[in-house]
Image (tube, rainbow, N blue to C red):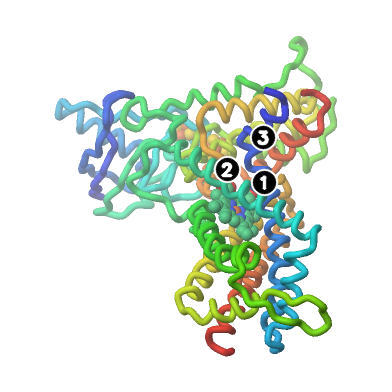
Amino acid sequence: MNLKLKIWRQPNKEAKGKFEVYEVEATPEMSFLEMLDVLNDQIIEEKGNPIAFEHDCREGICGTCSMVINGQPHGPMGLTTTCQLHMRHFKDGDTIVIEPFRATAFPVLKDLVVDRDSFDRIIQSGGFVSVGTGQAPDGNSILIEQEVAKDAFDAASCIGCGACVAACPNASAMLFVSAKVAHLAYLPQGQVEASKRVKRMVHQMDREGFGNCSNTYACEAECPKGISVENIAKMNREYFSSVIGSQKK
Amino acid sequence: MSWITNFLTSSLGKKLIMSLTGLFLIVFLVVHLSGNLQLLYDDNGVAFNSYAHFMTTNGLITFLSYGLYALILLHAIQGMVIAWSNRKGRSVNYKVGNTKSNTFASRHMALLGLLVFFFLAVHMGDFWYKMKFTDQLMLVPVQGMDVEVKDLYARVDAAFAVWWLVAIYILGLIALALHLWHGFQSAFQTLGLNHKKYTPVIKGLGMIYSILIPAGFAVIPLYFFFIK
Ligand code: HEM
Ligand code: SF4
Ligand code: FES
């Protein structure tokens, strides 16, 4: 299949980028990233500068492969990361526009690569549990109701890819942050620090320059892991009870 | 900063204010509409004029109404502040937009809010201002009352004979309907009220409300223009 690609090229953070047009021949069984690999080989043979894009696991679990394909983060297929998107979902002769994730808090570093350290700083501000190290505890020593474990696990399946930010018209990080807050707040191990955690993480999110949540739910629609906006409501409850309900100032 | 200012300036604190003021306005619209439907009585405005007299002279109502104006302003100003910081969240826009993953109304809450605001300015300038602060309205006697009251009914009648005023009302109410189509359920989500059993009910009620209430208001200018 022959494809026309319009790809955002930007040499570095400060430079003004622009779209370049490429033509590439792909086969339907290739993944989207393999198609870009073929294109990069082609560019290198022509002594050009290959397109920078991020990838790591290529099996849909690390969340690295960030790009917006024809207006949709991770492309047109639901619940799919770019690395797991296959060219059979495109047609011969298609024009595909590929852009980096766009958010003030995710500055473009090069071509399709954006800096998502803002997510790391949010996690560092509170997205963890403090536990005593030492012997590994017994698997089921703390009993957790199956329904609760399921909700916590669903939230925990967020891979931190940032597609929610990329999809949100306000570039809000609420789905990501709420998935992390809810995942820990559902579980007894996380509840000890829950009140402190939610405040710190929300305030760090605000400092990073993400937009606010307008409840458009574009995040949920584009999230490759199907993280639900119920987590956002859960985080709101956690935050309000932490600020208004708790005795701490 | 104290915990309270920290809270009210946080993204979630700002949204809590939007949600609570929005819900207050939702309740107000029901009260406002039920009063105004008296305009449809075929009694030359007796019922409506005495109701309007009561609403503008009763001390408690006057007190509450200033609270209402303050909350509308708070909602509008806070909404604009939020919309502004949302724009700053994305400084470079996409070449290919994404309209598949969300609704028109949810993307354009600020624009719809501004349209409602301009509509409110026209609406209050025409009725509320003239009623409260000018002597433009004639005094008419009302059966059963010992004072003469301002004839707001006549002003409504005259306003809704003008096609472009009727058009402004209809457009303003369409904007309100869209604002509430998204806003009603959004306010509950903001409060953290998302529930497997009740959220579908809230969404359904929101759709019914956002059509029924603006439609109820729209009946009034349409009735005066086309039927009366
Ligand atoms: C009677 C009139 C109005 C009613 C009943 C109303 C109701 C609501 C409700 C229920 C919400 C949802 C709150 C949430 O998401 O938590 C909302 C959001 C909003 N309103 Fe209004 N509103 C009215 C007038 C206005 C006006 C006059 C403006 C601005 C000039 C405005 C601007 C906004 C904005 C910008 C939002 C979205 C905030 C966000 O990003 O989530 N509204 N409104
Ligand atoms: S919530 Fe979904 S879209 Fe957002 S970072 Fe997590 S996995 Fe990615
Ligand atoms: S490369 Fe790891 S999720 Fe796509």
Quick check: do tags 2 and 3 share a chain?
A: no
Residue A23's x, y, as percent? Answer: 20, 43
Mark 2 or 3: the one toward you: 3
- Of the residues shown, which amino acid type is indicated by label 1? Thr
Q: Determine the chain carrying the residue at label 1.
A: B
- Where is mark 2, residue-wise? A213
Asked whether disc 1 touches disc 2, contact meaning CB atoms under 8 Å apart, the reply is yes
**Image quadrant where residue A228 sits:** top right
Q: Quadrant of the C terminus of chain B?
A: bottom right
In three-dimensional space, the C-alpha distance between marks 3 and 1, rounded to whole angstroms, equals: 14 Å
Residue B17's x, y, as percent? Answer: 67, 44
Density class for disc 2 (Cα within 10 Å; few <14, some 14-19, many ≥20) is many
Residue B140's x, y, as percent? Answer: 70, 81
**Image quadrant where residue A231 sits:** top right
Left or right position of B191 against A210: right
- Where is mark 3, residue-wise? B8
- Of the residues shown, which amino acid type is indicated by label 2? Cys
In three-dimensional space, the C-alpha distance between marks 2 and 3, rounded to whole angstroms, equals: 15 Å
Secondary structure state at the residue bearing disc 3: helix
Residue at 67 percent across and 67 percent down: it is B209
Left or right position of A145 against B49: right
Asked whether disc 2 touches disc 3, contact meaning CB atoms under 8 Å apart, the reply is no
Is the distance from the Cβ of mark 1 to the nearest ligand 1 atom less than 8 Å? yes
Secondary structure state at the residue bearing disc 1: helix
In three-dimensional space, the C-alpha distance between marks 1 and 2, rounded to whole angstroms, equals: 9 Å
Left or right position of A2 against B190: left
